[in-house]
Amino acid sequence: MSSVAEAAAQALRLVAGADPKLLDIVLLSLRVSLTAVAISCIVGLPVGAAIAVSRFPGRRGVIVVLNALMGLPPVVVGLAVYLLLSRAGPLGTLGLLFTPTAMVIAQTILITPIVAALSRQVVEDAWEEYREQLRSLGEKRFGAAVTLLWDLRFSLRHDHRDRARNEQGRPAARARAGHDPAHDRPRTQRRGVRRQRDGTAAVWMTSTMRAPRSLLPLRVEDLTFAVAGRRIIDGLSLTLEAGSRTVIIGPNGAGKSVLLRLCHGLLQPTSGNIVWNAPEVRGEPRRQAMVFQRAVLLRRSALANVAYALGVAGVAAGAREARAREALHKVGLDALAAHPARVLSGGEQQRVALARAWALHPEVLFLDEPTANLDPGATHEIERVIGAMHGAGTKIVMVTHNLGQARRLADEVLFLHQGRLLERAPVDRFFKQPASPEAAQFLEGELPW
Ligand SMILES: Nc1ncnc2c1ncn2[C@@H]1O[C@H](COP(=O)(O)OP(=O)(O)OP(=O)(O)O)[C@@H](O)[C@H]1O
Ligand SMILES: [Mg+2]
């Protein structure tokens, strides 16, 4: 007992006296461990994120191996590294045995699978939630992996034990002084004015620019989307022209959201075609946007969410903050710009999603029940914003269950039932004299499920 006490006392004396040899040992341990962690993060984080967002043959096997490697016993790794580096081993000529480098190698082998497996799990969980939104914004897989890693850094650090702590905002990048306003717009929009069918020029662009070919009209030809033999969209054909505001209505499960997703390119048709007048170019910023039924926002401030979308669209870093603030102002969220987006109320989150779409100045905007969670005042404001976007040249294609809203906002109504387009009519005629019995029953509130 006394020898233990003596040893402890001696250890304390060494620490208190800042013994140079002891300090050397501590610093060496720290250097070795931190170097190993840094290398493991550099390798493991991108590997884990890449596995999470990609699909390739043998992926499940890779994940099983990665998870198994997390439990690698240190003794086994130590022995393997010893055999590799020993004088008779394959790397013996390097003379690394019993050096700090050998310790870094061994620790890196131990830590990398843990970092890769944890980041794979956390990013994959988030990928399910964010996939459609990121694809809607035009984010590429690599960019999505980096975004999710950044967004989930708190989850990774806390081993996602406390998800609530993830809800932290991040100040948006400061606007860079002296930027060139010509670079404020995405590349596609810098190219020129869009002329619409009705002859109005989209005011998002300046009038001296040459017009790129309009995305519209959009032709949907004999479109079918089936899952497990069930036709959710069933041989649907229509043409969407520029200019008018198209509102899609129909009972629950009619296929309205699926139709929007198909048109926006988030789902692939089982058969039939979706033909844009000017096909989107892979890698170019998207000229269409979508506001989903449930807003999907990144774990950062409302402002940073809008600025992020602008970044993906190719807007120069220095111009993003001002444009994002303007967009938040349009939806009445100036006061909440710096708040973490994911702690905002449902209605406020929906307004951030609309601001994000507004900021992108899309040529076509798909809206899936954008005011479903909003109070009457906020609904009115959102309708005003949608009207303003339409006035600025954006084609509006909106799904709603709010028939009053359809009357207020629509130029034309599409009535969808069981995956089929049963009726298409100017708004007044549709509400006064629906042509199909199903639409008449729906308006009376008597259409059975
Ligand atoms: N990816 C999918 N895989 C399988 N079935 C799906 C998929 N997406 C939608 N469905 C099914 O297709 C049908 C139509 O769904 P959709 O979400 O388009 O309906 P909706 O008209 O938007 O209804 P609501 O008014 O309730 O939003 C539903 O029965 C739904 O369960
Ligand atoms: Mg829906």
Image (spheres, helix red, strand yellow):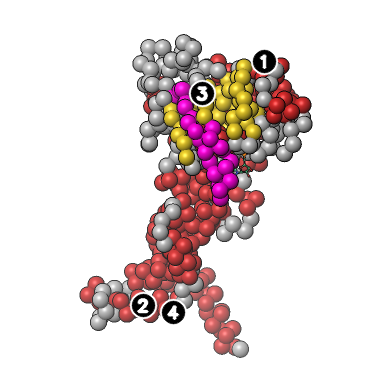
* Image quarter in which the N terminus is found: bottom right
Q: Residues within 10 Å of mark 4 (few under 14, many from 20)?
A: few
Q: Is residue 428 left or right of residue 288?
A: right
Q: Which residue is mark 3?
A: 240
Res. 27 image quadrant: bottom left
SS for callout 2: helix
Q: Of the residues under marks 1 and 4, which one precedes in the sequence?
A: 4
Q: Residues within 10 Å of mark 1 (few under 14, many from 20)?
A: some
Q: Is residue 100 left or right of residue 254?
A: left
Q: Of the residues under marks 2 and 4, which one precedes in the sequence?
A: 4
Res. 349 image quadrant: top right
Amino acid type assigned to the residue bearing label 4 in the image: Val
Say if mark 1 contacts mark 4, CB within 8 Å: no
* Image quarter in which the C terminus is found: top right
Q: Which residues are magenta?
A: 215-236
Q: Of the residues under marks 3 and 4, which one precedes in the sequence?
A: 4
Disc 2/disc 1 C-alpha distance (Å): 78 Å
Q: Which residue is mark 4?
A: 75
Q: Which mark is residue 80?
A: 2
Determine the residue positioned at 34% across, 72% down: 102
Q: Of the residues under marks 3 and 1, which one precedes in the sequence?
A: 3
Q: Of the residues under marks 3 and 2, which one precedes in the sequence?
A: 2
Q: Pick the residue in front: 85 or 59.
A: 59
